[in-house]
Amino acid sequence: MTDLKDNIREGEIMAPRLPPQLQNAADNFFNTKLIRTPGGSDRRKKQIDLLGRRAMAGAFRDMALNPASVVPGKRGEAGLRKIGEEKLK
């Protein structure tokens, strides 16, 4: 993590740039022209195309969960609790 930007302006990201091949993969994640399906079926291509259009339209923007609502206890507490003890004979 030594290539983080530390002199950024408001609105810029601190994360380093992806290598060109990874950036290309990220940009073309929903590109159905690059998907190869066995048997020539277009069903998978149509599913990914629909998913991509929905994602770009913002259909999934409110689907994130607050971690505090999922993890029991207060901040700093262990995630596991001891409920009881059982002695084996």
Image: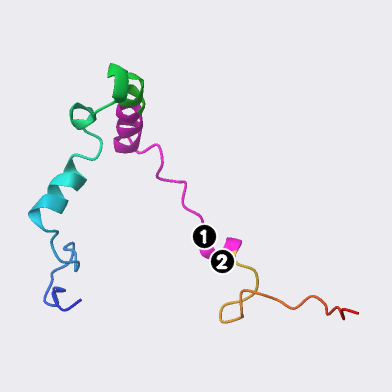
Does the magenta segment cover residue 62? yes
Taking 59 as reference, is 43 above or below it?
Answer: above
Which residue is nearer to you in this view: 49 or 43? 43
Q: Give how far apart the Cα atoms at labels 2 and 1 are.
A: 5 Å
Q: Give the magenta-colored segment's residue range.
A: 48-70
Q: Residue at x 19, y 66 (%)?
A: 15
Q: Residue at x 16, y 74 (%)?
A: 4
Q: Residue at x 18, y 62 (%)?
A: 11
Coordinates of residue 56 in the picture (x, y in percent): 29, 36
- Residue type beneath disc 1: Asn
Mark 1 surroundings within 10 Å by alpha-carbon count, few (fewer than 14), some (14 through 19), many (20 or more): few
- Residue type beneath disc 2: Ala
Give the quarter of the figure containing the N terminus: bottom left
Q: Residue at x 83, y 80 (%)?
A: 85
Does the magenta segment cover residue 59? yes
Badge number at residue 76: none
Per the image, label 1 sits on a secondary structure element best described as loop
Outermost residue toward the right in this view: 89
**Residues marked 2 and 1 touching at CB (< 8 Å):** yes
Coordinates of residue 79 in the picture (x, y in percent): 61, 74
Taking 52 as reference, is 27 above or below it?
Answer: below
Outermost residue toward the left in this view: 20
Give the quarter of the figure containing the C terminus: bottom right
Which residue is nearer to you in this view: 58 or 77? 77
Left or right of 11, for residue 80: right
Q: State which quadrant residue 72 falls in.
A: bottom right
Residue bearing mark 1: 66
Badge number at residue 68: 2
Coordinates of residue 73 in the picture (x, y in percent): 65, 73
Taking 68 as reference, is 89 above or below it?
Answer: below
Per the image, label 2 sits on a secondary structure element best described as helix
